[in-house]
């Protein structure tokens, strides 16, 4: 059977052999009691890499974001987020379900929130309006195609937020992709926000988990919110061990995923009827618009699957491809050939 080329997401990455060994050999304790030494090492490492006082191991990016929001916002308040952000689009209305707050959608430019728009979105003191509790930035931005928020934009948003007394949270699920693409360290990027969440289980290839970081006081309170959301784990060192390897051995190789995504995007954009906004291909996500082919997007995605190439329908005419460590340049070339052949067959 031919190799399946899975470009649906970087969440499909398999843990490395070293990660599997680390899981088997991990020193463990009860993390709810704060006694798991491997979890403690991961949290300390993550806090140091992000320049924060403390960090908290959580089960997922969604849990990390929602724990952060619940720790900061209150019922009847408002959270500013980009209009097509993961927090708004893919987290099952958790902000309203857990906190009783509402999200104010602010459209960005290719996913990047603009400081002037943020300034206008922060609510004035008015009994008719909710208090702005938090600003959320997604970096990189998934639905915009993996775009990176430039550091100078973060600086401006941070300045506006501080002047208004509003904290800033970064949904940095792919924060290290942003760091590698921009040539800035994760610490420098995170220095412009109060709290930050990043995923270990995407391009960094750990099997499970994310990390939330911020001040010690914030993390102390966030720990209770993690418990409320069912995130109190026991011998969690088995899961934290591959996370340590993700941070110490898997960051630099993200550049390879970015190079493969650029190659894929350029090849796809050369196909008749396929459009790719190459300006958005900054990291490991490629969104291709097949409207010009007049092929139904779901028929197209299924036809690719039948030929062993997995992708995701991402809109009425768009398809998302995500490069990752388990897809080589040769695989990308094969996928392009399959895509070209499928387009000829289903038109």
Image (cartoon, rainbow, N blue to C red):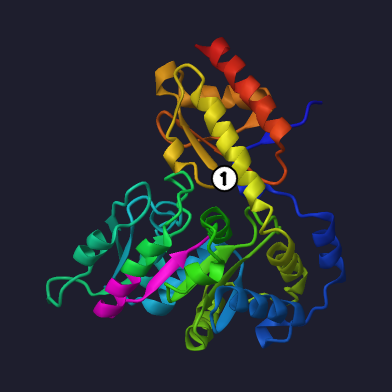
Report which quarter residue 322 is drawn in: top right
Tell me the residue that label 1 is attached to: 284
Give the percent coordinates (x, y) of residue 233. Answer: 67, 75
Report which quarter residue 103 is drawn in: bottom left
Q: Residue at x 23, y 59 (%)?
A: 117
Give the percent coordinates (x, y) of residue 222. Answer: 50, 80
Q: Out of 282 and 56, give the one closest to the viewer.
A: 282
Q: Residue at x 22, y 66 (%)?
A: 119
**Does the rendering let one see residue 67?**
no
Considering only vertical position in the picture, is 134 above or below 148?
A: below
Give the percent coordinates (x, y) of residue 244. Answer: 72, 69
Considering only vertical position in the picture, is 313 above or below 10?
A: above
Task: Give the left or right position of residue 95, taking residue 25 as reference.
Answer: left
The local crowd at label 1, few if under 14, some if 14 to 19, many if 20 or more residues have their Cα within 10 Å, is many
Q: Magenta residues, as a range?
A: 157-173
Which quarter shows the N terminus?
top right
Q: Out of 227 and 263, give the one closest to the viewer.
A: 263
Give the percent coordinates (x, y) of residue 177. Answer: 57, 55
Task: Give the left or right position of residue 28, taking residue 255 as reference.
Answer: right
Task: Give the structural element (helix, strand or loop) at label 1.
Answer: loop
Task: Give the left or right position of residue 167, taking residue 179 as reference.
Answer: left
Q: Residue at x 38, y 63 (%)?
A: 152
Report which quarter residue 278 is drawn in: top left
Total labels drawn: 1
Task: Give the left or right position of residue 215, taking residue 41 as reference.
Answer: left
Q: Out of 192 and 40, give the one closest to the viewer.
A: 192
**Does the rendering let one see residue 205?**
yes
242 in magenta: no
Q: Residue at x 75, y 76 (%)?
A: 235
């Amino acid at each position: 059977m031919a190799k399946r080329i899975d470009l649906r997401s970087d969440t499909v990455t398999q843990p490395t052999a070293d990660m599997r060994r680390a899981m088997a050999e991990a020193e463990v304790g009860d993390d709810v009691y704060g006694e798991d030494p491997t979890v403690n090492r991961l949290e300390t490492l993550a806090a140091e890499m992000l320049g924060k006082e403390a960090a908290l191991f959580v089960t997922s990016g969604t849990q990390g974001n929602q724990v952060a929001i619940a720790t900061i916002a209150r019922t009847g308040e408002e959270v500013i987020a980009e209009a097509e952000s993961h927090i708004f689009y893919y987290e099952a209305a958790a902000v309203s379900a857990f906190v009783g707050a509402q999200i104010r959608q602010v459209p960005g430019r290719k996913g990047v929130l603009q400081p002037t728009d943020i300034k206008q979105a922060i609510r004035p003191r008015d009994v008719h309006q909710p208090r702005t509790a938090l600003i959320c930035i997604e970096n990189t931005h998934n639905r915009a195609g993996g775009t990176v928020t430039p550091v100078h934009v973060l600086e401006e948003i941070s300045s506006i937020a501080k002047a208004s007394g509003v904290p800033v949270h970064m949904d940095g699920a792919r924060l290290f992709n942003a760091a590698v693409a921009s040539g800035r360290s994760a610490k420098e990027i995170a220095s412009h926000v109060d709290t930050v969440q990043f995923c270990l289980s995407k391009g960094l290839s750990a099997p499970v988990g994310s990390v939330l970081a911020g001040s010690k006081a914030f993390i102390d309170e966030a720990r209770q919110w993690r418990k409320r959301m069912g995130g109190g784990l026991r011998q969690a060192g088995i899961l934290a061990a591959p996370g340590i390897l993700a941070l110490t051995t898997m960051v630099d190789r993200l550049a390879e995923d970015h190079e493969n995504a650029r190659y894929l995007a350029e090849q796809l954009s050369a196909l008749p009827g396929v459009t790719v906004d190459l300006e958005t291909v900054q990291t490991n996500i490629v969104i291709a618009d097949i409207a010009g082919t007049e092929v139904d997007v779901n028929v197209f995605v299924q036809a690719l699957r039948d030929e062993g190439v997995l992708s995701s329908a991402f809109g009425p005419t768009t398809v998302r491809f995500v490069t990752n460590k388990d897809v080589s340049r040769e695989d990308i070339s094969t996928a392009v050939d399959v895509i070209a052949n499928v387009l000829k067959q289903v038109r």
